[in-house]
Amino acid sequence: MLNEGIPISLESLEEAVVENRSGRHDQSSSKITRRQIRTILVSSTGFFMDAYDIFVINLAVPMLGYVYYMNQNNMVPSNIQGIIKGITNVGNLIGQLVFGFLGDSKGRKSIYVIELLIIIVATIGSAMAGSAATGVGTLGFLGFWRFLLGIGIGGDYPMSATVSSE
């Protein structure tokens, strides 16, 4: 970038070109590689999916009311709504603390893979939440999987940005 008001000589431009050709330049001026593009796309897609996973429950809770609370005007009770909607954020906080520490101590890329696997398993678990165990309803299982999803998302927030920048 040229700064206005600062004269640039032909010699300084030639020197910059020679330095650039010799490979003595900073990484910010080099071209982006396919690997960097792939890393940025993967982490950006992960970040988009994290946001989707957090906010889609606001659309799903009214549907759950029609299925499981027909005798209560098709509405999930407000205390259960709060738990189902907020449990992901609690997991998110825990995930950020735990995976942030682990990423610094064990290596970001290996921890990034682990938290992505947690997100995948928890998303599938959320989709398949049912009342298989005696005494635990569908919303209980959904709450468990959403909590686990929040832990994975909490790890993904700081890791996506850091892995992309590296």
Image (tube, helix red, strand yellow):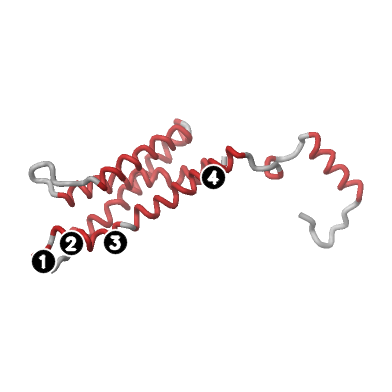
Secondary structure of the residue carrying tag 1 is helix
Disc number for residue 35:
none
Q: Residues within 10 Å of mark 2 (few under 14, many from 20)?
A: some
Q: Which residue is at a point 71% across and 44% down the rendered structure image?
A: 29
Task: Tell me the quarter of the picture where residue 103 sits.
Answer: top left
Q: Which residue is at a point 34% across and 54% down the rendered structure image?
A: 54
**Which residue type carries mark 4?**
Ile
* Labels 1 and 3: the sequence-earlier one: 3
Cα separation, mark 3 vs mark 4, equals 29 Å
Q: Which residue is at a point 51% across and 43% down the rendered structure image?
A: 162
Disc number for residue 65:
2
Q: Is residue 52 left or right of residue 82?
A: right
* Labels 4 and 2: the sequence-earlier one: 4
**Residue that badge 4 annotates:** 40
**Residue that badge 3 annotates:** 59
Q: Which residue is at a point 32% across and 53% down the rendered structure image?
A: 89
**Which residue type carries mark 3?**
Leu
Disc number for residue 72:
1
Q: Position of residue 66 (x, y in %)?
A: 17, 62
Residues under numbered marks 2 and 1 in contact, where contact means CB atoms less than 8 Å apart = yes
Secondary structure of the residue carrying tag 4 is helix
Cα separation, mark 4 vs mark 2, equals 39 Å
**Which residue type carries mark 1?**
Gln
